[in-house]
């Protein structure tokens, strides 16, 4: 296998990871859209999509291992492959969170609509943007952009804590809304985990890019 | 670097991963013990331990990358290193779940003691046993033992669903217990995630061992 073919392999891997990222982002978008509209059919689509995301994870892992096996990679390529393996696992878990949200929406659809003191859509849009931005940082090999993702994680954590408190009060004050408030509370925790995975991805990007920088300066 | 030194490196990596596993297991044990006894001091220890677990994760990753870089590993060693990288990430997240539990216990300790219809200790002991068994399967390169871990995941999922229903009813019937029931509910979800991570580890062990088997039969 020539160095050129090896690099074609790396490019293919990158493309596949981006497609995987798109699938995971779409799953979260769909689950959150379904939350807003109580669209159980859309939830079922999210559950279906999970299989494709899981299959994609396995394929990416296999390609990464094959590339590692076929040629002694240079340090920079090695760190890239290492990052791909880790980012891949995080994206699969973003998909899992979408499934968790979809399951809560299916549950929620059985209860009357309740007006709850939580802005799920806003929290979802920040979490989804973090995933998108972390992948953007990956494509651009941009450690600064990745750093911004880390900073936004605190915002989502704060929103999650606020949601916990306000939804607990709803349950205490009006037990007839317990089910809906609980479903919403779990959705906020799932979104917080989506943001955590974006944070993990951003950290992997920083690890990879800084490693590459070190290499370019001839240290490793 | 000789093949022997390379294999010493692999052995060291395995040892470190086991130590990391022990730290993660201990963190969960401590958090659950603290849940039972409302021991806030013990919770703070769990929060402290997280730093050591995170540092250990980074060290293991660095060693794995260095080993990949130093020598063209054979397919079987490659799959081993690949599994180590993934298991390492899962163990770190087991530690995160312990932290989440400890945070809930700190919250719980502010509320009066409540008798709740959920057996957290039993669920914790199954989840912790799954982590232990998945690492055991890793040490023994035992895909069958890993398979058993996968089967136990359904038990924990079932317990989690039951806990969700019974704790929701508590909140609906007695809003004064909302806070405690909610803390318990989140702890059960955290334990379910510990079991998920054990399942991931078991899957990685199967991937590794079956890959090794294939290699031993001369296919790859």
Image (spheres, coloured by chain):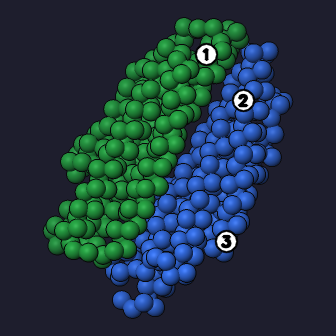
Chain colours: A blue, B green
Residue B30 occupies quadrant: top left
What is the x, y in percent for residue A79? 48, 71
Q: Which residue is mark 1?
A: B109
Q: How many marks?
A: 3
Relative horizontal placement of residue A175, taking residue A195 as reference (left or right):
right
Mark 3: few, some, or many residues within 10 Å (few <14, many ≥20)? some
Residue displayed at 77% across by 52% down: A125
Mark 3 and mark 1 in contact? Answer it, CB < 8 Å: no
| Callout 1: chain | B
Q: Which residue is mark 2?
A: A164
Q: CA distance from mark 3 to mark 1?
A: 44 Å
Q: Are marks 1 and 2 on the same chain?
A: no
Q: Are marks 3 and 1 on the same chain?
A: no
Q: Are marks 3 and 2 on the same chain?
A: yes
- From this view, report whether residue A30 is shown above or below residue A64: above
Q: Secondary structure at mark 3?
A: loop
Relative horizontal placement of residue A150, taking residue B50 as reference (left or right):
right
Q: Secondary structure at mark 1?
A: loop
Relative horizontal placement of residue B56, taking residue A151 as reference (left or right):
left
Mark 2: few, some, or many residues within 10 Å (few <14, many ≥20)? many
Q: Which residue is mark 3?
A: A142
Eye-nearest disc, 1 or 2: 1
Mark 3 and mark 2 in contact? Answer it, CB < 8 Å: no
Q: Earlier in the sequence, mark 3 or mark 2?
A: 3
Residue displayed at 48% across by 16% down: B36
Q: Which mark is residue A152?
A: none
What is the x, y in percent for residue A179? 69, 24
| Callout 2: chain | A
């Amino acid at each position: 296998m020539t160095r050129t073919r090896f690099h074609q392999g790396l490019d293919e891997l990158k493309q596949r990871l981006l497609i995987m990222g798109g699938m995971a982002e779409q799953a979260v978008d769909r689950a959150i859209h379904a939350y807003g509209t109580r669209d159980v059919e859309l939830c079922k689509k999210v559950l279906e999509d999970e299989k494709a995301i899981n299959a994609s994870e396995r394929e990416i892992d296999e390609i990464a291992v094959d590339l590692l096996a076929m040629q002694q990679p240079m340090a920079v390529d090695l760190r890239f492959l290492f990052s791909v393996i880790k980012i891949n696992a995080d994206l699969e878990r973003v998909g899992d969170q979408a499934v968790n949200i979809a399951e809560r929406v299916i549950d929620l659809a059985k209860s009357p609509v309740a007006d709850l003191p939580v802005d799920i859509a806003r929290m979802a849009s920040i979490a989804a943007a973090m995933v998108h931005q972390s992948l953007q940082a990956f494509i651009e090999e941009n450690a600064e952009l990745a750093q911004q993702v880390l900073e936004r994680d605190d915002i989502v954590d704060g929103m999650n804590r606020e949601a916990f408190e306000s939804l607990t009060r709803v349950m205490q004050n009006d037990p007839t809304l317990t089910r809906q408030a609980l479903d919403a509370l779990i959705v906020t925790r799932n979104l917080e985990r989506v943001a955590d995975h974006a944070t993990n991805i951003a950290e992997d990007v920083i690890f990879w890019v800084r490693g590459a920088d070190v290499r370019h300066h001839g240290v490793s």
